[in-house]
Image (cartoon, grey):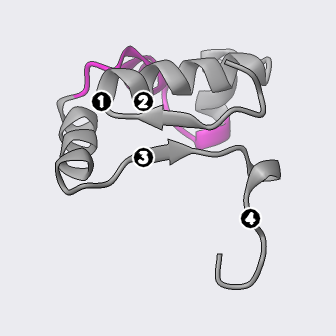
Amino acid sequence: MSENSNILIRSGRALGDALKEIRTQQGLTQQDMAERLNAHRTTIVDLESGNSKQLDRLARFIRFSGYDIILVPRQNRDTSPGA
């Protein structure tokens, strides 16, 4: 996955994989990310594992509602008014 790619999320597992990839692209360890979020490292491990029932339910809820979660790097966002 390149830094400038949008990432389509359709499951908790896909979200976990994306979070791990994003963190590693930024050169951060799980401990680094935990410190930035004021959380325990185990929180990062849990999020990146993709095994969270809540994350999977959220992704499924959105998908079954006819929408997708797409992670977009900030430098690629449309910054026009109303976006």
Which of the two labelled residues, at mark 3 and mark 2, occupies the earlier sequence position?
2
Q: Residue furthest front?
A: 66
- Nearer the N terminus, badge 3 or badge 1? 1
Query: Is 42 left or right of 6, judged from the image as shown?
Result: left
Instruction: Please give the range of residues in magenta.
Output: 36-52
Circles 3 and 1: CB atoms closer than 8 Å: no
Question: Relative to residue 52, is residue 76 drawn left or right?
Answer: right
Disc 1: which residue: 11
User: According to the image, label 4 marks what residue?
Assistant: 78
Q: Amino acid at mark 3?
A: Ile
13 displayed left or right of 44: left
Q: How many neighbours does mark 1 have within 10 angstroms: few (below 14), some (14-19), or many (20 or more)?
A: many
Residue type (three-letter) at the residue carrying disc 4: Asp
Q: Residue at x 68, y 15 (%)?
A: 29
Q: Residue at left 26%, top 51%?
A: 62
**Which residue is label 3 attached to?**
69
Q: What whole-number distance in Å separates the C-alpha atoms at marks 4 and 1? A: 25 Å
Q: CA distance from mark 4 to mark 2?
A: 22 Å
Residue 56, picture quadrant: top left
Residues at badges 1 and 2 in contact (C-beta under 8 Å)?
Answer: yes
Q: Count the numbered circles shown.
A: 4
* Residue shown at the point (69%, 32%) measured from the top left: 5
